Image: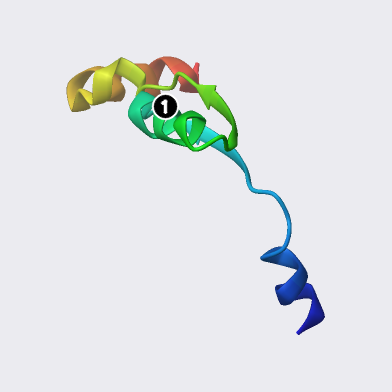
Amino acid sequence: MDKISNLFKTKVKVVNIGLETFHEANKHQNVECIHIDWRPAAGGDPKLLAILAKLNKK
């Protein structure tokens, strides 16, 4: 139980992947936050993803 209690006493650090607004909200609350600008490969387009998958097999 001590480990759980200690968890809630520590300062929060966030790694944010993708949503810039979530990063901004954390910064606004003085939460230490790193933002990674990530987007799905091929914009998430299934046809382009299938082509990429074939290219990766070679």
Figure colour scheme: rainbow
**How far across and how far down the image is residue 16, in percent?**
50, 33
Extreme-bottom residue of the structure: 1
Please report the residue visible at 29 percent of the width from the left and 23 percent of the height from the top. Answer: 49
- Does 52 sit above or below residue 29? above
- Residue 31 in the image: x percent, y percent? 58, 38
Q: Is residue 43 above or below residue 30?
A: above
* Identity, as a three-letter code, of the amino acid under mark 1: Glu
Front-lying residue, 31 or 46: 31
Residue 27 is left or right of residue 9, and the answer is left
Residue lying furthest right: 2
From this view, report whether residue 22 is shown above or below residue 43. Answer: below
Label 1 Cα crowd, 10 Å radius (few <14 / some 14-19 / many 20+): some
Residue 52 lies, in percent from the top left, at 36, 17
Say which residue appears at 56% left-offset and 34% top-offset: 30
Q: Which residue is mark 1?
A: 24
Q: Residue furthest front?
A: 29
Q: Quadrant of residue 8?
A: bottom right
Q: Residue at x 48, y 36 (%)?
A: 26
Q: Secondary structure at mark 1?
A: helix
Q: Position of residue 36 (x, y in %)?
A: 52, 22
Left or right: 1, with 58 as reference point? right
Name the residue located 58 percent from the left edge and 40 percent from the top edge: 14
Of the pair 35 and 58, the residue shown nearer to us? 35
Number of callouts = 1
